Image (cartoon, rainbow, N blue to C red):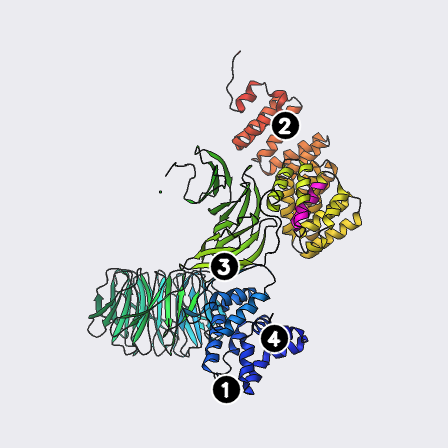
Amino acid sequence: MSDLGVWLAQQCQEDRDLLLKYQPKRFVKRGKVDRYCAWLMDFGFIEAKLELLGVQALIEDYDLTRNSDVLLSEEQSQTLRLIQRAIRKSAHVLDQDKTQLVEHLWGRLLDFEVPQIQGMLVKAKQSKDRPWLQPLKTNLERPGEGALRTLVGHSDSVKAVAIAPDGKTAISASFDRTLKIWDTETGRELKTLTGSSLGVSAVAIAPDGKTAISASFDRTLKIWDTETGCQLKTLTGHSSSVNSVAIAPDGLTAISASWDQTLKMWDTETDRELNTLTGHMGEVLAVAIAPDGKTAISASFDRTLKIWDTETGRELKTLTGHSDSVTAVAIAPDGKTAISASDDNTLKIWDTETGRELKTLTGHSDSVTAVAIAPDGKTSISASYDKTLKIWDTETGRELKTLTGHSGEVFAVAIAPDGKTAISASEDSTLKIWDTETGRELKTLTGQSNWVFAVAIAPDGTTAISASDDDTLKIWDTETGRELKTLTACSLGVSAVAIAPDCKTAISASWGNTLKIWDTETGSQLRTLTGHSSGVNAVAIAPDGKTAISASWDKTLKVWDLLTGKEVASFSGEDKFYCCAFAPDGVTVVAGDSSGRVHFLRLEGMGDLGDAAGLNNPVSLFYSGLALAKQGQYEAALAKLTEVAGIRPDALIVWLEQGKVLYELERYAEAVASLDQAKEIAGKDRDFWFCRGFALSKSDSQEAARESWDFAINIQPTDCDFWSKKAKTLLWDLERYEQTICCLDLAINIEPNQAYLWDWRGIALRRFGRAEEAISSYDRALELQPDDAGILDNRAYALLTLGRHDEAMANWDKVLEIDPNYANAYANKACYFALQNQIELALENLQRAIELEPERYRELAKTDTDFDGIRGDVRFQELLGNGVTEN
């Protein structure tokens, strides 16, 4: 921390807050330029102010000298401007995650050989007390490059944007069915306007700035009060999606363009439809009204533009020349020219009086989606599917600049009233504000049923793992090309895979936002890593096998501790990350993003994660221990886990798994002692406190067990879902019935009126040999959910276990009264009758169960010992689909 940062931290909270809020202003007011600059170039001040007051207040401190008599030197002014611009460009990230401050200052300012900036970066690095990814070179847009600011908030593509006449606010329209009003100076979201039932395609702001009109794919237009955000009117009449809307200069009329091949003129005060303009032979994609309000120009999928008389609705001219759909049009401020944008990748400038084509602007490599003309009419800006915007000289048709930065197609652009800034809207769900002045084949392996996105070869070269969009990974023998195993991952496709140095584990990445760790010998899933908010495109494992790095569409890189499964570091970029790799040193990371930028970062602050890779690698030892425990080799597993605990005593998961192994060995006191080793690091890990409570209960420490369980519950007192999911895993997957009962008791304590919890508790009690208690649990479930066939079926089985045969049969008969097609009741009755050697009744009920669910109940009858007494019966074999062999 810098000296200033240390000094600020030493002040009482009240004084520190006042200093951070007002001291820069005091320096300016008193003319203390050097002190002002020293504070604003000091990392300690920057970090503290960001933490207390947020990014916008920090940005505004750098503007204090603009409107004062204080004069800064050119060097001071340039240094402060660079720092401010760097912070402003990262504002959307810092608003969400202040811990990214150091990473972003390094990523944007590292190339600037300014002593004060380099000194600030050194202090910023020294401030990091946890693992982080340090940029080795500038890997984010530098101050002065690209957009001034990024506005985030929409959850889907942004289709349009309009800037208010005073330039202070802007309104965006999105596929997420909302419009958002933004403060263009601070980038703050002011309001969200909701009401459309489908995506919002366009928006226009009235000349007085008080109202706005939106167009939607739900076939309507809506008029909004921009001050309150209230919806004032809905305009209906179009028979298909509305693509565009323009408001006349007097604000009294508006014109909409639709996929129904028409334009409609509306009275904005009465919401009455005034006229329908017909003539286009394809969908109308855009409309613009001339400055005098007397004419309008429309752009259509039929490759033409049409000029209309807005008073009569008469078509005046048709402009032809584009070779594909015309997607947008803008009219110059003097009304004499118009510019059209097209799917043919060009823009055309037209004379609006003669309809003559004046120029064709070429340069985009994909469809041009939008165009806006600057207030002085001398320049225009186009937006394209090629992910860029271009600034053009409208007099010469020359391309002046290309604006890059969006990671998705750009759908819309608007220019501020002063012409100095523009705002673009993109498929990447963001808006950006721009400064317009400165802007080889050995074998073929077959078996996967969809695209194969990635493959990794094991370090020993004997196996390979492929990742596919069919939701699986496959392990292959590289010598024979034989498929060894299929690992079923998730329902959203597997995008990448990496194999650990010891070849025993692999990590897969998925578009379902997760990574999974796999045992390559058994094919079993060991752990799921969560934290990304969008698809994960790539994963790499460090050479020592202890950490991994993932790259995601959520624009982040994340570093994972493979022992604990925890995220230990993250880096937020400006574009979607598509690839990542570790250098041989295990700390240098290289990653690539969708903009074409390559990032070089260094993983700092990891500390000691155990011995070097090999026999004493704690990750290898840990997963070997888990595998042994799953095989029931608890003593061998305990030896492995004990060794890991000696290497990584900081890893809660190790003590937890060691405790679980000890109580499988019925060494409950030792289990408690193991778990107590980790009490100080357990924090709010509910699984830990539950397991500790269970071990205590088995050690006859009921009061201490209750305290541990109460602690677990109080972490999130209303979260029943956590306990029900844990009970489900314990009951159905692990078959740990005593633990299931404890877990369900905690869930029922939170939500006592959930019938399924009492039903599951009954199943666990019956399977644990406490059938009488199970009946009571089922009865409570039936009080909550009377005549539930599933609960009655489970209750009947418990009655049968207790020898209460008549009651059980009565329950099953009632089940079939409620649901005559409840196959499990027929199957259970068949089992009972087979045990009683009542062959006819057994076969009758089994036949009915097989009719309802053939595959399930044929397989059950083949293996269920209840049918052993009738297995030799020819009719039984016929029900199983087996042929009869004559002796």
> Residue at the location (59% across, 66% down)?
127
- Point out the tag, 1 or 2, that comes first from the N-terminus: 1
Q: Is residue 661 magenta?
A: yes
Question: In what quadrant of the picture does the N terminus appear?
Answer: bottom right
Q: Is residue 741 magenta?
A: no
- Point out the tag, 1 or 4, that comes first from the N-terminus: 4
Q: Calculate the distance from the C-alpha at mark 3 to the C-alpha at mark 4.
A: 28 Å
Rendered view: 252 above or below 560: below
Query: Label 4 is placed on what type of residue?
Result: Leu
Q: Calculate the distance from the C-alpha at mark 1 to the C-alpha at mark 3.
A: 40 Å
Q: Which type of secondary structure does the marked residue at label 4 adopt?
A: helix
Task: Find disc 3 in the rendering and name its residue.
Answer: 601
In this rendered view, identify the residue nearer to me: 782 or 694. 694
Query: Label 2 is placed on what type of residue?
Result: Cys
Nearer the camera: disc 2 or disc 4: 4
Nearer the camera: disc 1 or disc 3: 3
Q: Residues within 10 Å of mark 1 (few under 14, many from 20)?
A: some
Describe residue 370's horizontal placement relative to residue 556 as left or right.
left
- Point out the tag, 2 or 4, that comes first from the N-terminus: 4
